[in-house]
Image (cartoon, grey):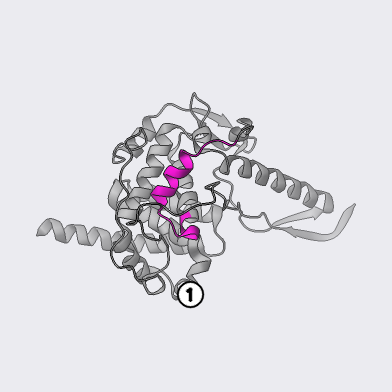
Amino acid sequence: MEATSALPFSSPKPRLLLNLCNSSSSSPPPSHRLPFSPFPLNHRPKFPKPLTLSPSSTNSLSPSPLNAVAEAVEAPAAASTLPNGTYVKIDKSGRFCSPRAARELALLIAYAACLEGSDPVFLFDKRVNAKRVPGYVFNRASLLQYDHMSFGGEPVQVETEKEAEELMQKNESDSLIEAEVLSAPPKLVYNKFVLRLSRGMLEAVVSQWNQHVLVIDKIIPPNWKEEPAARILELCILHLAMAEISSLGTRHQIVINEAVDLAKRFCDGCAPRIINGCLRTFLKDHSGAGAVQVQR
C-alpha cells in the first residue's frame, strides 16, 4: 500500500549493554582501588588520594601496549565482506583482530566501570576471566554479520509503509546481532592482540586519569558540564582517545578519526563534532607542552 507522503525513519544507535560483568559483586577487593567516573572535576567525588594503576596481570594479556597498534597493522587477517561492502577483520581463529574492535571493547568496559564506580582494568580482567555460564553457546556467524561501522545517521525517508517495516526489521536484526556479540565472553569474540590492546588502553586511562580530568574540564562545552551523567559515553571516548595519544603513542590522526567514529556509532546529536574539536584542542596543548619540555 502506497503511503500518501514520505515517511521519516530514523535508524537507532547501537545500545551498549550494561550487564557486562555477569556477577552480583562489582567492587574490586583491593582497598586502594577508587571509584571510576568520567565526570568533570567539579562534579566528581573528592578522593583522599589519586587513582593508582592497577597491578599488571602475569597472564598473556599484559605485555607492554606501546607497539600494539603497529602490531595490529601487521596482524594477518581475513577480511569478510558484508552485503553493504563493509569489511570485518577476522583472524584465522574466527575472532575480531582489528584495533577498532579493541577500542570498542575498551569503551564498553569503561562505560560499565563508570556506571558501577569500579576500576576499569579490574572490571576488564574480571570479565575476561569470568567462568562461562553452563550450556552457553555462542553463534560465531554473528561475528561475520557484526558491523563496526554501523552509524545511525540522519533520518531516512521512505515512500511506503512496506519499506519502513523492512527497515525496522533490519534494525531489529542488527540489534540482536550486536547483543549476541557484545554480551558474549570476550575470549570468544576477540583474539589475544585485541584483548592486550584494549587492556593497555584502559591501563593508560587509569594512569592518566587525574591529569586528563583537569584537561577535559577545560575543553568540553558548558552544557556537558551541567549534565555529566548524560554524557558518560562522550567523556569515556575523550578519556580513551587522550590516553591513547599521550601514553600509547598512536598517531593523533588515527585516534581522532576513531574517536569520532565511536561517537557517531554510540552517541547522538553533535557529539562527533564536539569530540573532534575537544581532541584537537587537547592535541594542540599536548604538543605545546611537549615542545616546552624538550626545550628545557
Residue 288, quarter of the rendered image: bottom left
Is residue 179 left or right of 289 when viewed as pictured? right
How far across and down, in percent of the image, does residue 284 sit?
Answer: 29, 61
Which contiguous range is marked in magenta?
Answer: 113-133
Residue 68 appearing in the image: yes
Most foreground residue, 154 or 138: 138
- Farthest top residue? 92
- Farthest right residue? 1
Q: Residues within 10 Å of mark 1 (few under 14, many from 20)?
A: few
Residue at the image position 49 percent from the left and 39 percent from the top: 130
Q: Quadrant of the C terminus?
A: bottom left
Residue at the image position 36 percent from the left and 71 percent from the top: 41
Residue 277, quarter of the rendered image: bottom left
Is residue 71 left or right of 123 when viewed as pictured? left
How far across and down, in percent of the image, does residue 45 sit?
Answer: 39, 70
Q: Which residue is mark 1?
A: 223
* Helix, strand or loop status at disc 1: helix
Is 44 inside the magenta-drawn segment? no
Q: How many marks?
A: 1
How far across and down, in percent of the image, does residue 159 sit?
Answer: 80, 54
How far across and down, in percent of the image, does residue 236 sit?
Answer: 44, 58
Residue type of the residue flagged with mark 1 = Asn
Is 127 inside the magenta-drawn segment? yes
Residue 101 appearing in the image: no
Residue at the image position 65 percent from the left and 35 percent from the top: 83
Classify 230 as above or below 23: below
Look at the magenta stretch and give its main secondary structure.
helix
Most foreground residue, 69 or 128: 128
